[in-house]
Image (cartoon, helix red, strand yellow):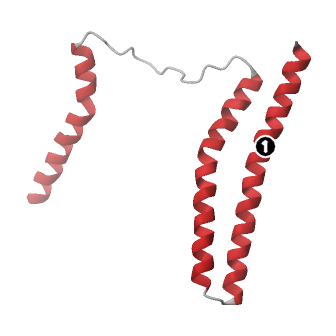
Amino acid sequence: MNFKNKNWQKLILFSYIFFTPAFVLYAQGQNPTPGIKNPVNIDSIPGFIQTILEGALKVGIPVIALAIVYCGFLFVKARGKPEEITKAKDALLYTLIGAAILLGSWAIAKMISATVTGLGA
């Protein structure tokens, strides 16, 4: 019985938190329009590629930073054992290769975009 009461309270709390903003907007006369709006306004293929790569960079750079920190923990955890140090070095190498690929793809896309827009002018 106690299990049902706890879940019922959570359901009420969730629905209150979820629906309150919509009720407030409706009460203020700002009726949200139905449907899904496109948050990305793209008018060309180079713009599309730039948006995709910027999104990949925004996600990839923090992941790379966390991977480098993780590699540091692997080095500390190794405590001088040659096989574990080798694993830590390999992990750091692969992380740096991934970072180079990520940043290199961004640089190449920027160069191609500049070339295409320069030819079109």
Determine the residue positioned at 23% across, 20% down: 24
- The kind of secondary structure element at disc 1 is helix
Relative to 94, residue 75 above or below: below
Q: Can you identify the residue that label 1 sits on?
A: 105
Q: Quadrant of residue 87?
A: bottom right
As rendered, which of 106 and 26 lies closer to the eye?
106
Relative to 26, residue 69 above or below: below
Q: Position of residue 61 (x, y in %)?
A: 63, 49
Tally of numbered discs: 1
For label 1, the crowd category at 10 Å Cα-Cα, with few meaning under 14, some 14 to 19 and many 20 or more, is some
Q: Position of residue 107 (x, y in %)?
A: 80, 40
Relative to 50, residue 35 above or below: above
Residue 67 vs residue 103: left or right? Answer: left
Q: Residue furthest left?
A: 1
Quarter of the image with the N terminus is bottom left
Q: Position of residue 90 (x, y in %)?
A: 73, 73
Q: Residue furthest bottom?
A: 81
Residue 115 vs residue 34: left or right? Answer: right
Quarter of the image with the C terminus is top right
Q: Residue furthest top?
A: 29
Q: Position of residue 62 (x, y in %)?
A: 58, 51
Determine the residue positioned at 58% across, 65% down: 69
Determine the residue positioned at 87% across, 23% down: 116
Query: Hey, what amino acid is under mark 1?
Result: Ser
As rendered, which of 67 and 1 lies closer to the eye?
67
Relative to 21, residue 77 above or below: below
